[in-house]
Amino acid sequence: MNARLTSIIQNIASGSLSRQVARKIVKTLNIGDLDYKIHAGVLDRPHYAYVMLNGARLARALGLMRISALEFGCAGGKGLLALERIAKMVKQETGVDVDIYGFDTGKGLPDPVDYRDLKYHWKSGFFAMDEQKLSPNLEKSKIVFGNVKDTVGTFFEEYKPAPVACIFHDLDFYSSTIDSFKILDANPDRFLPRVFNYFDDIIGGDLELYCDWTGERLAINEFNDSHSDRKFSPAYHLLASREQNRWYHQIRILHFFAHTGYDTFISKEDQQIPI
Ligand SMILES: C[S@@+](CC[C@H](N)C(=O)[O-])C[C@H]1O[C@@H](n2cnc3c(N)ncnc32)[C@H](O)[C@@H]1O
C-alpha cells in the first residue's frame, strides 16, 4: 500500500482526520474567537497565543490594561515576530496592551557548562541572530542583548516594564534557564500574581529525551525546591481536556503566593448551588 494511503487510513483510524477537516473549515471561514482558534489548532504558535491571551485576561480581571511578555531566547526573531502579531489580536479581544521584551546573546548558544546542558543535542553558536535583518521587521519588541546571567538582574530598574504576565522560555540549556530564573526572585508585584509560561524544551522527541534531571525540566524542579512562596505548576485544566494538544504539556503557571493581589477575587460572583 502506498505511504499516502497508509497515512490517510491511519488518520481516519486515530480520529485525527476529522479534526484536520474541522481545522481547515475554521481557518478558511475565519470563524470563532481567539480562544477557540487557539485550541482548535488553526493559529501559528497557538501555545504563544494561549499564554499571552490568558495573561491579558488575568490582567484585565485585576484592572490592569498594560502588561509585559518576556521571551528568553530569541534566535533569528521568529518568536518575537509571532508575539507582535499575537499582541494585536490580544489587544483587539481584551483591550490590554502588551509590551514585548526578548533576551538573547545575539550570538547564539554560549558554551554548554556540563551534561545538564545536553551536549549530545546542542552546540555553542547555534541560533545566532542576524540583528540587521531582524530589527527593521520588529515593530515594538525590545531586545535585551547579553548573557542572561548579566542582564536579568538590572532589567526591572533599566526598563521599568509593566507587570510581567507571560514568559516564553527557550534558552535550551539548564545553565541558561536557571540563570534566567533569577528574574523571578524580584518583588512579586513586578509580575501578575499568576504568570503564564511556555517551556519549549521539556517535551521534544526520541533524540532530545528531555528528562527531570537535565535541561529546562531540572531548572523548574530546582526552582520549585528552593522557593516556598513561588512555584511553577503544570496547567492541570489543560492536561485534563478531552481534546489534547501536545503543547498543553509545555505550559506552567507560576504562582506568586506572596503577591499583594494573589487573593483578589476574580471569579464568577454567582456561585450558589440551589437545592
Ligand atoms: C532555540 S533558540 C530560541 C528560538 C526562539 N525562541 C524562536 O522561537 O524562534 C535559543 C536561543 O537562546 C539563546 N541563549 C541561550 N543561552 C543564553 C544565555 N545564557 N543568555 C542569552 N541568550 C541565550 C541563544 O542565543 C539562542 O538564540
Image (cartoon, rainbow, N blue to C red):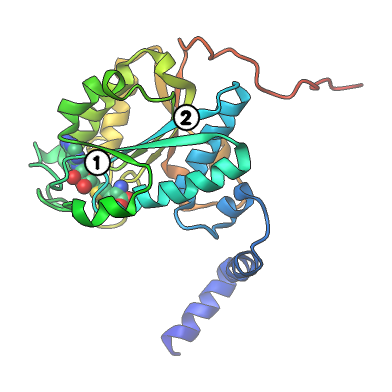
* Residue 156 makes an appearance in the image: yes
Left/right placement of residue 38 relative to residue 197 reads: right
Left/right placement of residue 138 relative to residue 273 reads: left
Could you classify mark 1 by the number of other residues whose Cα lies within 10 Å: few (under 14), some (14-19), or many (20 or more)? many
In the picture, residue 32 is in which quadrant?
bottom right
Left/right placement of residue 75 relative to residue 88 reads: left
Q: Nearer the viewer, mark 2 or mark 1?
A: 2
Considering only order in the chain, which callout, 1 or 2, is on the residue closer to the N terminus? 2
What numbered label is drawn on residue 64? none
Reply above or below: 54 against 123: above
Residue positioned 42% across, 84% down in the render: 3
Residue type at mark 2 is Ile
Q: Which residue is mark 2?
A: 67
Q: Which residue is mark 1?
A: 171
Q: Quadrant of ligand 1?
A: top left
Q: Position of residue 43 (x, y in %)?
A: 52, 57
Asked whether mark 2 lies closer than 8 Å to ligand 1, one says no
**Label 2 – label 1 distance at C-alpha:** 22 Å
In the picture, residue 154 is in which quadrant?
top left
Asked whether mark 1 lies closer than 8 Å to ligand 1, one says yes
Q: Nearer the viewer, residue 211 or 153?
A: 153
Could you classify mark 2 by the number of other residues whose Cα lies within 10 Å: few (under 14), some (14-19), or many (20 or more)? many
Residue positioned 56% across, 41% down in the render: 91
Q: Locate the C terminus by quadrant.
A: top right
Q: Are marks 2 and 1 in contact (CB under 8 Å)?
A: no
